[in-house]
Structure formats: C-alpha cells, structure tokens
Amino acid sequence: MATAEKTVLAHHDSLMAQMDQLYELRQQLTKLPAADTAATGRSRRALLGAENGMMFWMHNYRRPADSATAARRLAYYAGQQERIDSVSRLFLSSQDSARQLVGAAPAANPSSAQ
C-alpha cells in the first residue's frame, strides 16, 4: 500500500521540479518575434494547461483514510497514478512544443537594435 502511494507522490514530486521550466518557457515564448503568433499562443496555453493540470491534481488529491479497505486504497492510488500520468503527458508535450518554437526562432540581430 505504501509503495503505491509513494510511487504516485514521487511522480508528483518529479513533475513539481519542472514547474520552473514551464514558467521559463512561457517567458521565452513571450519574447519571441511575432513570426507565428498563433503557434506561440497555442504553446503558451499548453504550458498553462500543464500547470493548471498539476494544480487541479494537487487540490483534488486526498489520501484515503486508514480505515478504508486495502482494495479501495489500491484502487484510489491506481486512479491517481493515471491522473498524474496524464499531467506528465501534458508537461512533456507542452515543453516539447515550446522548445521547438524557441529553438526555431531566429536569433535577434543586435545591429538592427541600434
């Protein structure tokens, strides 16, 4: 039982360590030249969606009571594992998309700023 809970929470912790990356990518997208504002907007919304998915999961996670049957607790943790896996997919896909846009952006030309 403790293993199931620890697995779910370890996955949560690994995603929480990436929250700063979501924010940083959103900031980088904001600074991109307006070459493809639709793609940039979609990517920023996807990053926000990933953050919101994590916040929703955290606000709705409730450790089962110790008085709950073992089967009920295992079922709860299995459901939570599915949910946190879904949040993980949001994290990965939104970061991948944002990095592609940031990486594909032309470098700013310092001489044109003068």
Image (tube, rainbow, N blue to C red):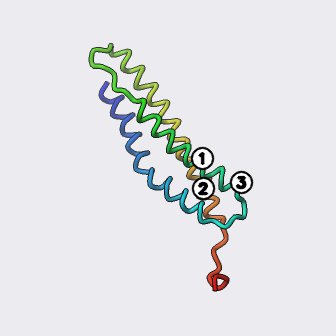
> Which numbered marker is on residue 38?
3
Q: CA distance from mark 2 to mark 3?
A: 13 Å
Which residue in the rendered view is the most extreme toward the front? 114
The kind of residue on which mark 2 rests is Ala
**Measured from the top left, where is residue 102 in percent x and y?**
61, 62
Which of the numbered marks, if any, corresponds to residue 98? 2
Q: Secondary structure at mark 3?
A: helix
Residues marked 1 and 2 touching at CB (< 8 Å) = yes
Q: Position of residue 65 (x, y in %)?
A: 30, 19
* N-terminal label among 3 and 1: 3
Cα–Cα gap, marks 1 and 2: 9 Å
Q: Which label was assigned to residue 46? A: 1
Please give the name of the residue rendered at 36% of the width and 39% of the height, measured from the top-left corner: 10
| Quadrant, the C terminus | bottom right
- The image quadrant of residue 57 is top left
Of labels 2 and 3, the one closer to you:
3
